[in-house]
Image (cartoon, rainbow, N blue to C red):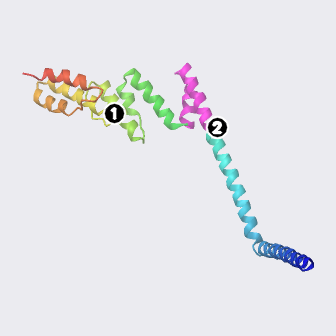
C-alpha cells in the first residue's frame, strides 16, 4: 500500500508541475500575442505618472513664487515687481491682496475696479465699496449687517415703519441682533 501511495503522490506532484508549466506557456502565449498593447500601456502609465509629478512640481513652484511675492509685498507694499509676480503666479491671491489694500484704505474706486470671478469675493467687494461710499448695499455674506445699514438710512430719512419692517427680519441669534433691537427703539414714535 505504501508503494501505491508513493506512486499517487508522485503522479499528483507531476500533475501540479504540469499545470504550472501549462499556465506558464499560456502566459507566454498571451504576452507574445498582446506584447505591443502591454508595452504601450506600461509606457502610457509611466508617462502619466511623470506628467502628474511634473504638473504638481510646477504648481508647487508657482505657489512658492506667489508666497514669496506676498511676503515681499508685506514688507514693501510699493514693490511693483513683487505685485506683478503675485498676479502672474496666483491671480486669486493677487485679487485678495488688492481687495485687502483697497478695503483697508476705504478706497471705493479701487474696490469697484477689482474684477473677480468668485461670487463670494464679488459680494464682499461690492459690500465694502458701498461702505466706502457710505451707501447701504445688498450683500449675501453680510446680509444682516446690510439690513441694519438700510434700516439706519431709512430711519435718518424718516421712514421708521419701513426700517422697523427690515429690522424685524433679523434673527435673534444673529451677531448684530442687539444693534437691530437698539435701532428698533429709534422707530418708536
Residue 61: image tag: 2
Residue 67 vs residue 24, the one in the foreground: 24
Residue range (magenta) = 60-89
Q: Quadrant of the N terminus?
A: bottom right
Q: Is residue 42 above or below residue 102?
A: below
Counting residues from the N terminus, which is met first, the one under dot 1 or under dot 2? 2
Residue displayed at 13% across by 24% down: 157
Q: Secondary structure at mark 1?
A: helix
Q: Is residue 47 visible?
A: yes
Q: Position of residue 20 (x, y in %)?
A: 82, 73
Residue 117: image tag: none
Query: In the rendered view, does 32 fall on the left or right side of 108?
Result: right
Whether 65 is among the magenta residues is: yes
Residue 126: image tag: 1
Q: Secondary structure at mark 2?
A: helix
Q: Quadrant of residue 28?
A: bottom right
Q: Is residue 40 above or below residue 139?
A: below
Graded by Cα atoms within 10 Å as few (under 14), some (14 to 19) or many (20 or more), the crowding at tag 2 reads: few
Q: Quadrant of residue 176?
A: top left
Judged from this view, the residue extending furthest toward the right is 3
Amino acid at each position: 500500500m505504501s508503494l501505491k501511495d508513493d506512486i499517487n503522490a508522485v503522479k499528483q506532484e507531476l500533475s501540479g508541475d504540469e499545470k504550472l508549466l501549462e499556465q506558464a506557456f499560456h502566459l507566454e502565449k498571451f504576452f507574445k500575442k498582446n506584447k505591443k498593447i502591454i508595452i504601450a500601456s506600461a509606457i502610457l502609465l509611466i508617462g502619466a505618472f511623470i506628467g502628474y509629478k511634473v504638473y504638481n512640481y510646477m504648481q508647487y513652484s508657482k505657489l512658492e513664487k506667489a508666497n514669496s511675492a506676498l511676503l515681499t509685498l508685506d514688507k514693501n507694499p510699493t514693490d511693483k515687481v513683487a505685485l506683478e509676480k503675485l498676479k502672474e503666479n496666483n491671480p486669486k491671491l493677487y485679487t485678495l491682496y488688492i481687495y485687502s489694500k483697497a478695503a483697508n484704505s476705504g478706497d471705493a474706486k479701487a474696490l469697484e475696479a477689482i474684477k473677480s470671478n468668485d461670487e463670494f469675493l464679488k459680494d464682499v467687494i461690492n459690500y465694502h465699496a458701498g461702505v466706502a461710499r457710505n451707501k447701504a448695499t445688498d450683500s449675501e455674506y453680510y446680509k444682516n449687517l446690510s439690513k441694519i445699514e438700510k434700516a439706519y438710512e431709512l430711519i435718518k430719512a424718516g421712514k421708521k415703519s419701513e426700517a422697523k419692517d427690515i429690522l424685524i427680519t433679523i434673527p435673534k441669534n444673529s451677531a448684530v441682533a442687539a444693534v437691530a433691537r437698539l435701532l428698533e427703539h429709534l422707530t418708536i414714535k
